[in-house]
């Protein structure tokens, strides 16, 4: 391990994959074994992504396919996005909405 890393590393912030955060053979475990002052912190911002990903599995695949197609319809065309905004303006919507990307 780099002497500079050992000198400057006091902790690591990571997701909960075994290869990174595992206290046995994971990178965190190996670092902590050699340098007991290092602190491992799980990335809690990653949790909502995992929850949403699991929740999407509960929807029928046809629903997610429709959402993906609607998202693609607007996201790959600035003309379609402009028409979507124009319709909302004509309907006198207070807030103009945009189609979100499905990832």
Image (cartoon, rainbow, N blue to C red):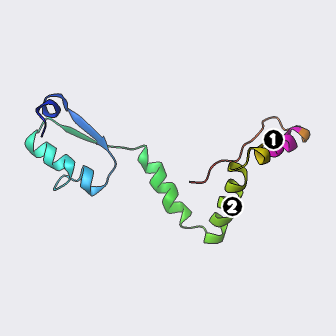
Q: Which quarter of the picture shows residue 7?
A: top left
- Residue 69 forms part of the magenta stretch: no
Q: Residue at x 53, y 66 (%)?
A: 57
Question: Which of the pair 73/8 is nearer the observer?
Answer: 73
Where does the image place residue 74, in percent across and percent down from the top left?
A: 72, 50
Q: Quadrant of the N terminus?
A: top left
Extreme-left residue of the structure: 34
Mark 1 or mark 2: which comes first in sequence? 2
Q: Residue at x 68, y 49 (%)?
A: 75
Q: Which quarter of the picture shows residue 65?
A: bottom right
State the separation of the CA atoms marked 1 and 2: 18 Å
Secondary structure of the residue carrying numbered label 2: helix
Where does the image place residue 36, in percent across and percent down from the top left?
A: 11, 39
State which region is magenta: 83-89
Q: Please name the residue that numbered disc 1 is placed on.
A: 85
- Label at residue 69: 2
**Up-down: is 53 above or below 1?**
below
**Residue 7 shows in this picture:** yes
The answer to whether 72 appears left or right of 37 in the picture is right
The answer to whether 45 appears left or right of 59 in the picture is left
Secondary structure of the residue carrying numbered label 1: helix
Q: Residue at x 56, y 54 (%)?
A: 103
The answer to whether 76 appears left or right of 42 in the picture is right
| Circle 1 residues within 10 Å: few <14, some 14–19, many ≥20 | some
Question: Which of the pair 81/65 is nearer the observer?
Answer: 81
Query: Magenta residues: mostly which secondary structure?
Result: helix
- Label at residue 62: none
The answer to whether 6 appears left or right of 47 in the picture is left
Where does the image place residue 37, in percent across and percent down from the top left?
A: 13, 35
**Residue 60 shows in this picture:** no
**Up-down: is 33 above or below 59?**
above
Where does the image place residue 89, in percent across and percent down from the top left?
A: 87, 38
């Amino acid at each position: 391990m780099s002497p500079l890393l050992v000198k400057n590393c006091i902790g690591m912030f990571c997701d909960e994959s075994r290869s990174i955060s595992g206290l046995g053979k994971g990178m965190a475990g190996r670092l902590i074994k050699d340098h007991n002052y290092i602190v491992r912190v799980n990335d809690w911002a990653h949790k909502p992504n995992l929850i949403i990903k699991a929740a999407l599995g509960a929807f029928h695949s046809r629903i997610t396919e429709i959402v993906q197609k609607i998202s693609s319809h607007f996201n790959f065309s600035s003309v379609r996005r402009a028409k979507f905004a124009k319709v909302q303006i004509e309907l006198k919507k207070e807030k103009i909405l945009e189609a979100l990307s499905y990832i």
